Image (tube, helix red, strand yellow):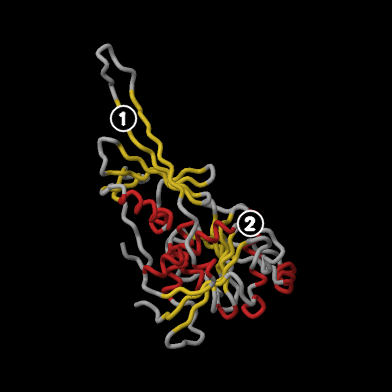
Amino acid sequence: MMSPVATLRIDRSWNEVLFRTTAFTPMRSAAALLTWEMDPPLHDAGVPAAIIDIVSQVAVSLGPVAFRLFWPHDLPAELSTLAAPRAWLPMRLYQRLTRTWPADIAVANDARGTAELFKQDWQLQGQTALVLRAARPSETTIGTLRSLRDWHGVCFPSDARLLIAPAVDGDGILLAAASEDELADVLAGIGQAVRMLGMTLDGDASATGERPAMNVAISHHVDASEPDEQGFHDYHYEYDIYRFSRADRTYVARSYVEETDRADFLSRLQGDESHVLGAADLTHPLLLEAVDYLRAAGKTTIERLSESEGYVPLEIAKPGGGN
């Protein structure tokens, strides 16, 4: 059942002292604050389930999500954990006094695992999560996430895309990104998910407006053997390659000329890395736009290359668990 959320609000400017978000905002990052109003109003209710689902879906569509783990009980099976090193007793006492004790870390690769971060010391503002650029963060970033309680004046981790942290009493979600472009993509993804669920989104025009335009590049290719004496080829393939890009993410699809109504997604490119599409990609705003583009171009059959099953139908997932 959807939580009784009346209105969500995204702001790019807010009272950081009132919401106690200053300590969670890295230096030179682009940040926004997500808040909500309940109808009827509820007190000390935590983050509504619908908002947890939206933020978790958008976050994990960008990459694995690492967060602090305080209570390692009844965790989703998909979570992987990285235990904090145990210091000797005098050092542990010093760490408590200086608020630098290291926390265990959990890493989620799906929305269900990501949602766990909102149960881990969220309302007391003990939680911080990072959306990673690669499968695992560097040891430096792990160490920072374990121990750092004040991100103000610290540069944004180079191997992270997004920082997620609670506002005062957990009644707001701080979203800080490495760049304005990456933050715009996150906010647009949240906006799209909110509207898909029939909820209302309010706030700064810069926060709730359209995301940067998707760039589409199409190239034509011929892959053929040398012709024999009669001019025939042992093999001859002719196809178009589509590249759908925004920020540092690109989805690559192929369509053969003899199958004009079909297209196959081959990979996701990020930086120098290439990946087959995974579950998190199926909710990413850029992929949704790419699918709409291909359908408008007459592609009625759209599949994706998988790790183990070859080409499988592309089933777009929607926030809330539907397809």
Q: Residue furthest top?
A: 229
Write the residue at 34% across / 54% down. Answer: 292
Label 1's element? strand
Write the residue at 60% across / 66% down. Answer: 31
Q: Position of residue 222 (x, y in %)?
A: 35, 29
Tell me: 198 left or right of 182. Answer: left
Label 2's element? loop
Q: Position of residue 77 (x, y in %)?
A: 42, 63
Residue 57, by quadrant, is bottom left
The residue closer to the viewer here, 179 or 85, is 179
The residue closer to the viewer here, 159 or 198, is 198
Write the residue at 50% across / 59% down. Answer: 185
What amino acid is found at the position of numbered circle 2 in the picture?
A: Pro
- Residue that carries the numbered disc 2 in the rendered image: 157
Which circle's residue, 1 or 2, is located before the other in the chain? 2
Q: Locate the C terminus and report the quarter of the image it occupies.
A: bottom left
Residue 63 visible in the displayed image: no
**Distance CA(mark 1)–CA(mark 2):** 44 Å
Number of the front mark, 1 or 2 = 1
Q: Locate the N terminus and report the quarter of the image it occupies.
A: bottom left
Pointer 1 with pointer 2, Cβ within 8 A? no
Q: Position of residue 76 (x, y in %)?
A: 43, 66
Q: Which mark is residue 237?
A: 1
